[in-house]
């Protein structure tokens, strides 16, 4: 159980100075990029998370175990001195992924999931899957070996409204997929709708979902507050308040099928503030503070530990972490921008005051 230094009167705010100590958390959906960007963001994640599922959507994408091994070495080399952060690697599924590659990945011990990006659905998804039928041999191998399929769950049809793409994906792709491969273990990533919450909650075993901090804290108004706000644009795009409420209820329900995945997705300032701005919110700096804010708002700080530190490890069949991390309710201001190699990066909620911070 998390230890709270004060009793939490739900759903009112807890007093300033309150501390919350939880088992070291893990991030089950993270973009670390490469090169200078990796150098810039890795210390933020390593200060809050013991492990993270690292997304493979580099350019070119990480499609083989050999590429994942090399990327893993670059991440390990970029860790701050003394950090024991462990990257959990993923492969990028393509129309041509051979089943042998799945077996190689499984045998490696360091590849923990294979990622399905429908072609064109999101950042660096051009090499993604055009038709699931092309991946059946690979999916069969995944089902057989227990390798997790992590899914960006949106259809890309031009005639489907951008706000409906997740729901339509569930109906048209996910439900048939689970009929064809009933034992395939699936994580539906960064869910954004009541529909996804209902589907995962009622779907039985073998499927779980990750939730981002930004989808728990913001509805789609955030993209349009007083003007166009590119730093609140991500995919799947923020949804109506009704959906945010459903996500928050799921995250704080104690149901182990819902766990933490930040989807922290850094893009340089100029690539977001542009004619065609990139999708992705940078939350790697302050992810746990953001989640604590969301959990506090519904008087459920006592359930942060399960969501952040237990349920993901259990689903991925990895041991839970030992050791603890402590957050304190102390006001601090999110920086307006951060260094990002030779460029800069704008974190989510830049310039705003947050009530929580990690103190050790
Ligand atoms: N979430 C995002 O808006 N962007 C992610 C890709 C993704 O997770 O879909 C990125 O890599 O920038
Ligand atoms: Zn995605
Ligand atoms: Zn992502």
Image (cartoon, rainbow, N blue to C red):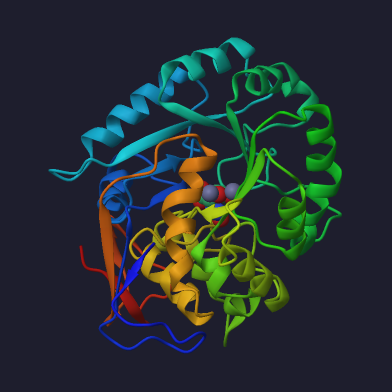
Asked if 291 appears above or below 180 in the picture, the reply is below
Picture quarter containing residue 47? bottom left
Q: Quadrant of the N terminus?
A: bottom left
Q: Position of residue 79 (x, y in %)?
A: 22, 42
Asked if 120 appears above or below 258 in the picture, the reply is above
185 displayed left or right of 175: left
Residue at the extreme left of the image, as rendered? 81
In this rendered view, identify the residue nearer to me: 259 or 83: 259
In this rendered view, identify the residue nearer to me: 187 or 238: 187
At x 72% / y 76%, what residue is drawn?
242
At x 64% / y 72%, what residue is drawn?
244
30 displayed left or right of 204: left
Picture quarter containing residue 134? top right
Q: Position of residue 142 (x, y in %)?
A: 63, 22
User: From where the camera sits, is residue 341 visible?
Assistant: no
Asked if 311 appears above or below 89 in the picture, the reply is below
């Amino acid at each position: 159980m998390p230890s709270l230094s004060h009793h939490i009167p739900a759903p009112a705010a807890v007093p300033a100075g309150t501390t919350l100590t939880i088992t070291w958390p893990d991030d089950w959906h993270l973009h670390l990029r490469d090169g200078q960007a990796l150098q810039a963001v890795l210390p933020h994640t390593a200060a809050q998370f013991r492990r993270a599922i690292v997304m493979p959507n580099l350019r070119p994408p990480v499609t083989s175990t050999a590429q994942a091994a090399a990327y893993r070495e670059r991440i390990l080399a970029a860790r701050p001195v003394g950090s024991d952060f462990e990257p959990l690697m993923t492969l990028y599924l393509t129309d041509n992924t051979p089943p042998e590659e799945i077996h190689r990945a499984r045998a490696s011990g360091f590849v923990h999931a294979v990622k399905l990006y429908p072609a064109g659905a999101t950042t660096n998804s051009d090499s993604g899957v055009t038709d699931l039928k092309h991946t059946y041999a690979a999916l069969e191998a995944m089902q057989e070996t227990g390798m997790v399929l992590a899914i960006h769950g949106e259809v890309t049809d031009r005639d489907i409204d951008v706000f409906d793409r997740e729901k339509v994906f569930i109906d048209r792709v996910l439900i048939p997929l689970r009929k064809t491969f009933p034992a395939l273990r699936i994580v539906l990533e960064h869910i954004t709708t009541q529909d996804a919450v209902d589907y995962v909650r009622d779907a039985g075993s073998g499927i779980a979902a990750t939730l981002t901090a930004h989808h728990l804290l913001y509805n789609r108004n955030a993209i349009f507050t007083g003007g166009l706000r590119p730093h609140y644009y991500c995919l799947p795009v923020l949804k109506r308040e009704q959906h945010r409420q459903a996500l928050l209820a799921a995250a704080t329900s104690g149901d182990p099928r819902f766990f933490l995945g930040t989807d922290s997705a850094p893009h340089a300032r100029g690539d977001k503030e542009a004619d065609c701005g990139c999708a992705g919110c940078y939350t790697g700096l302050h992810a746990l503070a953001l989640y604590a804010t969301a959990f506090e708002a519904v008087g459920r700080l006592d359930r942060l530990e399960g969501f952040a530190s237990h349920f993901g490890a259990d689903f991925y069949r990895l041991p839970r972490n030992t050791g603890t991390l402590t957050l304190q309710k102390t006001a601090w201001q999110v920086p307006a921008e951060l260094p990002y190699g030779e460029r800069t990066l704008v974190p989510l909620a830049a310039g705003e005051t947050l009530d929580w911070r990690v103190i050790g």
